[in-house]
Image (cartoon, rainbow, N blue to C red):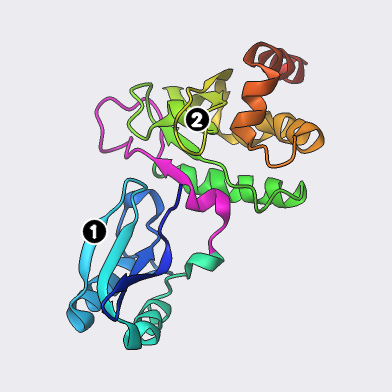
Amino acid sequence: MHDHLAWHDQGGGRSFYGLFVENGRILDTEDVQLRTAVRRIVQLFGAGVHFTPQQNVLLTGIPDGRRAALEAVLGHHGVRSAGAISSVRRWSMACPALPTCGLALAEAERALPGVIDELERELERLGLADLRLTVRMTGCPNGCARPYTADLAFVGRSADKYTIFVGGSVLGTRLATAYADLVPRHRLVARVRPLLERYRAERLPGEGLGDFCCRVGSDELRDDAVAEAAP
């Protein structure tokens, strides 16, 4: 599966640029003016705008000779290049949840970036920074961000508590299973740390996290999670 970020040849002397949009929210913040940058690119280059299933944006029809100019616009507005975004963040996704959705029981879109920050540090510590895995977070069990097919997912169950699911796949072709329940948000990464450590020690060559969880078996993984959580 390809996320289509960065430059790709479109044919006829034109290219398209895949722009990462965290959790699908195109907005300006104090540090990154993403919305302004996209508007400016459409105005300057006449770019087409297409959305992807990964909630990113493709800016299409850019003349090959103007690639550097488009990158300059992004850089001027603080937008990071695709190469500067970690693998785990590139493949993350959250539903809107609170305060937009009346069904939400917990945070998702506003919470996942902080969880990813912590997960990035943990993966770096374990030497797994380049691991490609899908991470999803939803504010309720309805699954609007496709958590039930992800390598790792956090599904809102009550106020600031989540069920952790593991064992899906990058391609989204396998269902995940519950790993731990009612985990407070500030403990999510801590609860999956033993799983990540075991994955690092026991994985097969080329085996993804979801594949590993499927091979080891959900019952054994849940037993490990219960033992880890015990006082």
Numbered label attached to residue 58: none
- Which residues fall within the magenta stretch? 85-108
The image quadrant that residue 204 belongs to is top right
Foreground mark, 1 or 2? 1
Q: Where does residue 41 sit, x and y in percent of width and height?
A: 26, 77
Magenta stretch, main secondary structure, is loop
Task: Name the residue rendered at 29%, 73% in the picture.
Answer: 11
Q: What amino acid type is highlighted by mark number 1? A: His
Residue 99 vs residue 39, the one in the foreground: 39
Left or right: residue 12 versus residue 201 is left
Task: Name the residue rendered at 51%, 31% in the picture.
Answer: 153
Q: What amino acid type is highlighted by mark number 2? A: Phe
Taking the magenta stretch, the answer to whether it contains residue 170 is no
Q: Which residue is mark 1?
A: 50
Q: Kindly tell me whether residue 160 is visible in this rendering.
A: no
Q: Which residue is mark 2?
A: 154
Left or right: residue 19 versus residue 120 is left
Where is 61 relative to 119, above or below? Answer: below
How many other residues sit within 10 Å of disc 2, few (<14), some (14-19) or many (≥20)? many
Where is 21 relative to 123, above or below? Answer: below
How many other residues sit within 10 Å of disc 1, few (<14), some (14-19) or many (≥20)? few
For numbered disc 1, what is the local secondary structure?
A: strand
Task: Name the residue rendered at 64%, 25% in the picture.
Answer: 213
